[in-house]
């Protein structure tokens, strides 16, 4: 059993906005670090039992259920209500599709906080202390009750025909008892081209680029595998130093192939890495005699015999 037992939950991702500040661009499809924004968010909420994306259907990194508010473009609360109708879990994670730095750990932290108290939900606040109700985990019953109450009360001209059309998200947060968790990284969203540029630059910083690249490759290849990156890098180093530089990529490829042949997971990769690393060290020892110097006798003379 893992140290983290996730609270059973579904996820609703809102991805159907007009992106006016991006000139109407297809925001969920914009790529950050080689991955579509929507796919990055779907990876962060991969623990959900059912994931509903409120938008027109498109190819995604994993299977989801699609929904659409009526009419399309009726606003975030109408979209949330449409997505919520396709969920059955007692808890639901609600996310926007433009969160480049959202991680599974953040979603798990929200759910852990929700489990620990009796509030209606737990949401992230940004660097300025503003609520981010689309980076949040809610009790589904509380969310449905609040949305139904807002629809009944929507007769003040801010919505059409007693529906949720056009209502702002702040009306929802005002109707709920919420716990707030500050996180200026997870709350960063991409509303403008400047935001897109900042996000693309940030993931290429030295401390993030390798993890980002590994995630992008796994998405591209359609694989789900958590491996010990440091162990593989150590293996590549040992192969390069103990054998020859080109041996590094070839050895790591063969390790991955061996693990796949055995239909193994991270444990199989670790075991194959261990064997290959031991082989690289034995190979190096044969060359140096275990001393770090070439394994040649002091009085040895060159072998000048002709090839047979």
Image (cartoon, rainbow, N blue to C red):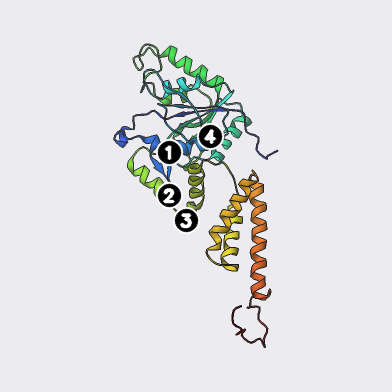
- Viewer-side residue, 90 vs 124: 90
Instruction: Give the mark nearer the N terminus: 1 vs 3.
Output: 1
Q: How far apart are marks 1 and 3 (CA)?
A: 21 Å
Q: Is mark 4 on a helix, strand or loop?
A: loop
Where does the image place residue 270, in percent across and percent down from the top left? 65, 52
- The residue that label 1 is drawn on is 37
Res 17 label: none
Question: Which residue is at a point 68% across and 83% down the rendered structure image?
Answer: 297
Q: Distance between the residues labelled 3 and 4?
A: 25 Å
Determine contact: label 2, label 1, CB under 8 Å: no
User: Which residue appears farthest toward the left when viewing the image?
Assistant: 23
In the picture, the quarter occupied by the C terminus is bottom right
Q: What element carries label 2?
A: helix
Is residue 125 at all visible to an observer of this figure? no
- The residue that label 3 is drawn on is 206
**Front position among marks 1 and 3:** 1
- Viewer-side residue, 72 vs 213: 213
- The residue that label 2 is drawn on is 202
- The residue that label 4 is drawn on is 45
Q: Distance between the residues labelled 3 and 2?
A: 9 Å
Instruction: Give the mark nearer the N terminus: 3 vs 4.
Output: 4
Q: How far apart are marks 1 and 4 (CA)?
A: 13 Å
Q: How far apart are marks 4 and 2 (CA)?
A: 22 Å
The residue carrying pointer 1 sits among few (fewer than 14), some (14 to 19) or many (20 or more) residues within 10 Å by Cα, namely many
Question: Which residue is at a point 48% across and 49% down the rendered structure image?
Answer: 213
Where residue 163 sits, quadrant-wise, is: top left
Where does the image place residue 174, in percent across and percent down from the top left? 46, 24
The residue carrying pointer 4 sits among few (fewer than 14), some (14 to 19) or many (20 or more) residues within 10 Å by Cα, namely many
Q: Distance between the residues labelled 2 and 1?
A: 14 Å
């Amino acid at each position: 059993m893992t140290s983290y037992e996730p609270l059973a939950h579904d996820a609703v991702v809102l991805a159907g906005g007009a992106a006016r500040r991006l000139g109407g661009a297809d925001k969920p499809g914009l790529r950050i670090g080689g991955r579509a924004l929507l796919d990055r968010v779907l990876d962060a909420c991969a623990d959900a039992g059912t994931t509903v994306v409120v938008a027109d259907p498109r190819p995604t990194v994993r299977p989801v259920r699609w929904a659409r508010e009526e009419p399309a473009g009726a606003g975030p609360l109408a979209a949330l209500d449409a997505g919520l109708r396709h969920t059955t879990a007692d808890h639901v994670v609600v996310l926007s599709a433009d969160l480049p730095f959202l991680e599974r750990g953040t979603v798990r932290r929200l759910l852990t906080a929700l489990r620990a108290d009796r509030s209606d939900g737990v949401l992230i606040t940004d660097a300025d202390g503003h609520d981010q109700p689309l980076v949040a985990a809610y009790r589904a019953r509380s969310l449905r009750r609040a949305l139904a109450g807002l629809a009944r009360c929507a007769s003040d001209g801010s919505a059409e025909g007693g529906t949720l059309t056009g209502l702002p998200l702040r009306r929802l947060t005002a109707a709920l008892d919420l716990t707030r968790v500050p996180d200026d990284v997870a709350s960063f969203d991409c509303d403008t081209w400047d935001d897109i540029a900042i996000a693309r630059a940030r993931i290429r910083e030295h401390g993030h680029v390798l993890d980002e690249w590994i995630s992008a490759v796994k998405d591209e290849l359609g694989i789900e595998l958590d491996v010990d990156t440091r162990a593989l890098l150590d293996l590549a180093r040992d192969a390069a130093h103990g054998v020859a530089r080109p041996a590094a990529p070839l050895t790591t490829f063969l390790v991955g192939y061996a693990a796949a042949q055995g239909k193994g997971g991270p444990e199989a990769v670790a075991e194959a890495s261990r064997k290959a690393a031991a082989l690289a060290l034995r190979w190096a020892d044969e060359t140096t005699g275990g001393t770090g110097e070439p394994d040649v006798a002091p009085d040895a003379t060159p072998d000048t015999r002709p090839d047979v």
